[in-house]
Image (cartoon, helix red, strand yellow):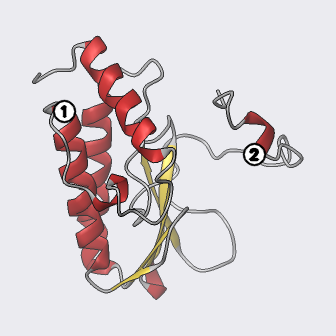
Amino acid sequence: MIPPDIVDQVPLDLLGLIAGLPAGTARIPWDGPLVRIIEHDAHAPGHAALLIEEHGVLVAGDMLSDVLIPMLDLNDTADPVEDHLAALRLLEDVADDVDVVVPGRGSVGRGDEVRVRIGQDRAYVHALRDARAPADPRISPSATYGRDWLPGVHERQLRHLARSGEPDR
């Protein structure tokens, strides 16, 4: 499942030492702070964000980055656009409880930044769905991160959705 161009860069030494939680688990079963699991299928099947409720921290995983565009799950999913939009709705549902958003890549966001990032990701996904060029600084010529490869990711997603005949196209 790892793209061939990065497979050598992904450390696999911890593979097999981590056990997944059963589908539908709502909270992390541990003695630490209360952590709500927000499971969705946006980036990959069984992907999740974690909301550390008492601290107002949303650990967003591979979502809500200020430097990366949304990367849809294009492997055998019926509707990757709707999967991503549904995940953004789930994150938006908890946004009022969030003071800090921590993406897997990019910088930490504070305050209203969670809503700004949700809006930016939604606009990008809508542009993909509608086959139009997004006005997204993360893939613009002035981008400071990934400018040598991120536009290619965008083009691959656009081509994939065009070939698959996404709904609403």
**Mark carried by residue 19:** 2
- Check the image and report above or below for 56 versus 138: below
Residue at 53% x, 70% y is 35
Could you classify mark 2 by the number of other residues whose Cα lies within 10 Å: few (under 14), some (14-19), or many (20 or more)?
few
Residue 68 in sight from this viewpoint: yes
Observer-nearest of 144 and 136: 144
Mark 1: secondary structure? helix
| Residue with the mark numbered 1 | 129
For residue 120, which quarter of the picture? bottom left
Q: How many marks?
A: 2
Q: Quadrant of the N terminus?
A: top right
Task: Report x, y in % for residue 110.
Answer: 37, 85
Say which of 59 and 116 sits in front.
Answer: 116
Asked if residue 89 lies left or right of residue 65, the reply is: left
What's the amino acid at mark 2?
Answer: Ala
Q: Is residue 105 above or below residue 102?
A: above
Location of the C terminus (image quadrant): top left
Q: How far apart are marks 2 and 1 (CA)?
A: 35 Å
Give residue 96's position: percent from left, percent from top.
25, 78
Q: What residue type is labelled 1?
A: Arg
Q: How crowded is mark 1: few (under 14 residues within 10 Å), some or many (20 or more)?
A: many
